[in-house]
Image (cartoon, rainbow, N blue to C red):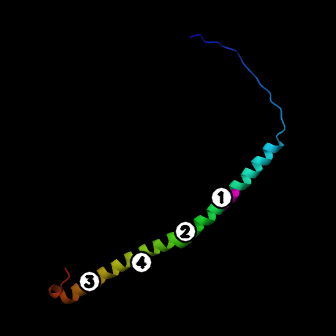
């Protein structure tokens, strides 16, 4: 198999790029609109899904802590006669 070197090749292409510029602008506008809508969806998910789930988690930990404190208090007051160990 032979290797051939053709040297440097320079092409110059001239054309009307106004339609290309319009298409790029349209595409850019559509992507910006999509980004804005995605941002709104993200804010809605944070507000209506993530924040309440975090709140439920915090409330669950607080309830478990309160229960543990109450059971410890029962154990202190009643000592060995309480069922809780």
Q: Residues within 10 Å of mark 2 (few under 14, many from 20)?
A: few
Q: Which residue is mark 4?
A: 59
Give the distance between the C-alpha atoms of the residues marked 2 and 4, in whole angstroms. Answer: 18 Å
Q: Is residue 72 magenta?
A: no
Tell whether label 4 touches label 2 (CB within 8 Å). Answer: no
Say whether disc 1 or disc 3 marks the residue closer to the N-terminus: 1
Give the distance between the C-alpha atoms of the residues marked 2 and 3, in whole angstroms. Answer: 36 Å
List the single residue furthest toward the bottom: 77
In the picture, measured across the screen, residue 47 lies left or right of residue 83, that is right
Q: Which residue is mark 2?
A: 46
Q: Position of residue 77 (x, y in %)?
A: 22, 89
Tell whether label 2 touches label 1 (CB within 8 Å). Answer: no
Q: Which mark is residue 71?
A: 3
Q: Secondary structure at mark 1?
A: helix
Q: Which residues are magenta?
A: 32-36
Give the distance between the C-alpha atoms of the residues marked 1 and 4, in whole angstroms. Answer: 34 Å
Say whether disc 1 or disc 2 marks the residue closer to the N-terminus: 1
The residue shown at (74%, 20%) is: 9
Tell whether label 4 touches label 1 (CB within 8 Å). Answer: no
Tell whether label 3 touches label 2 (CB within 8 Å). Answer: no
Give the distance between the C-alpha atoms of the residues marked 1 and 3, in whole angstroms. Answer: 52 Å
Nearer the camera: disc 2 or disc 3: 2
Q: Position of residue 18 (x, y in %)?
A: 83, 43
Nearer the camera: disc 1 or disc 3: 1
Say whether disc 1 or disc 4 marks the residue closer to the N-terminus: 1
Say whether disc 2 or disc 3 marks the residue closer to the N-terminus: 2
* 46 or 79, nearer to the observer: 46
Q: Which residue is mark 1?
A: 35
Q: Main secondary structure of the magenta part?
A: helix
Say whether disc 3 or disc 4 marks the residue closer to the N-terminus: 4
The residue shown at (49%, 74%) is: 52
């Amino acid at each position: 198999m032979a290797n051939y070197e053709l040297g440097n090749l320079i092409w110059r292409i001239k054309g009307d790029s106004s339609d290309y510029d319009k298409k790029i602008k349209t595409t850019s506008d559509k992507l910006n609109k999509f980004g804005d809508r995605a941002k709104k969806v993200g804010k809605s998910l944070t507000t209506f899904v993530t924040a309440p789930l975090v709140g439920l988690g915090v409330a669950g930990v607080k309830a478990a802590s309160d229960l543990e404190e109450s059971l410890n208090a029962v154990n202190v007051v009643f000592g060995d006669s309480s069922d809780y160990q």
